[in-house]
Image: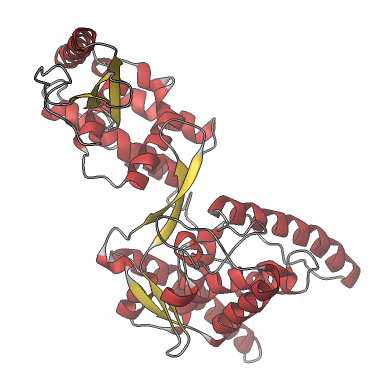
Amino acid sequence: MAQSRKDFRGRALRKGEVQRASDQRYMYTYTDPLGRRKCLYANDLVTLREKEKQLMKDQLDGLDLYAKGRATINDTFDRYMATKYDLRESTRSGYLYNYNHYVREEFGRKKILDIKYSDILQFYYYLLNELDITLGTLDSVHSLLHPTFQLAVRDDIIRKNPTDGVMREIAKKAGKNRGVRHSLTVDQQRAFMGYIANHPVYYHWWPLFTVLLGNGCRIGECLGLRWNEDLDFENNVISINHSIVYYPIGNSRKSEMRISKPKTEAGIRTIPMLDVVRDAFEMEKEAQQETGFNKQEIEGMSGFVFCNRFGNVPTPQTVNHTIKRICNSYNAEEVLNAKKEKREPIILPSFSCHHLRHTFATRLCEAESNLKVIQSVMGHRSIETTMDVYAEATNRKKQESFENLAAKLDNIF
């Protein structure tokens, strides 16, 4: 609807004001501290401007509280988020989810001027020990609190950032490997895929997990693949140029699927299609010729490869829940089978979709020594990320090599 600069009585309207043609009500549009568009409504222009005046007073009161150091952590965080105008919607949603879930209700209500280093340290240990979050999740919370307090430092509200050095202290005591995603071993990978392939209930998941383990793409990238646009069967390559994200809508409990573009150029890439991955795609297509293809359209995109029984794209949460069910079912059967066969069971650990990406990266590192090739295939923005995975893979191979050497030396000494 085009906004007129005058109302129906010829009175000039200010910026953000409009009179709607449908019901002749007046509306004022503004952006709140979280970057969300909001509106004020009134039946007449005088009432609307009274509401605008009250809104301005409330905003100035909030600024006065901040300037005098009486603002809470929540106030300062909202102010910080208002400066992040260029955030993608999915990124902003993720930030707000983490902050609202772990900080806002209790710790976030404390006055920012009262927070000391020990308060942050104690809060982080509470999250680790009482809420049992991983070090990786804690790092995500820290990445929101640190710039929030840094904003207050730069605005001369506080002298020092109380979050400085806290994560180093936490990591030193909690152990550097806490929260690190480890890959499946070769035996575990074989057991997982073999169980799915031969299971009467889970067999239809085999193509999806084969693709995840066969090209190392992220779960959102995998679910976003389209038959015609992203799969080149003639040249045997897969194009990764977008992903599907599933996140809450504002502060509501409802979630929706959206298309997300890669944050960096490294995320846009092509991956060679292995024969087993090609077989998985062909198997999926044959199955859908019987059951029906994906009919969902997301922001103008359609023709997605994977679909659930409703003809829609599965959510990442659904895939993770399926992995958990498969692992629980497999482990229960494996313990009994191993006992009958008088051998040690091969137990599957608790893992998620991202562990499958890490597993592919490990297998790739075991077979390829060129870090730039590995970085390109994985879509890592930083070579340091690639080096971390490569170091873990080579350490495992080194251990295996020495175990083999020990067996040979036993015959010599």
Farthest right residue? 340
Give the residue at x 50% y 77%: 397
Image label count: 0
Near-viewer residue (228 or 100): 228
Give the residue at x 78% y 68%: 344
Quadrant where the image shows the C terminus: bottom right
Farthest left residue? 12
Q: From where the camera sits, is residue 322 visible?
A: yes
Question: Quadrant of residue 391 in the image?
Answer: bottom left
* Whole-percent x, y for residue 145 in the image: 30, 33
Give the residue at x 60% y 83%: 279
* Whole-percent x, y for residue 81 in the image: 26, 33
Q: Is residue 101 above or below residue 13?
A: below
The answer to whether residue 243 is left or right of residue 384 is right
Near-viewer residue (203 or 391): 203
Quadrant where the image shows the N terminus: top left
Q: Is residue 291 above or below residue 280?
A: above
Q: From where the camera sits, is residue 134 visible?
A: no
Farthest front residue? 9
* Whole-percent x, y for residue 76 in the image: 25, 24
Colouring scheme, one of rainbow, by chain, secondary structure, one colour: secondary structure
Near-viewer residue (54 or 219): 54
Q: Is residue 361 above or below residue 93?
A: below
The answer to whether residue 65 is left or right of residue 238 is left
Give the residue at x 67% y 59%: 309
The answer to whether residue 205 is left or right of residue 8 is right
Near-viewer residue (81 or 257): 257
Q: Is residue 160 above or below residue 236?
A: above
* Whole-percent x, y for residue 161 in the image: 21, 29
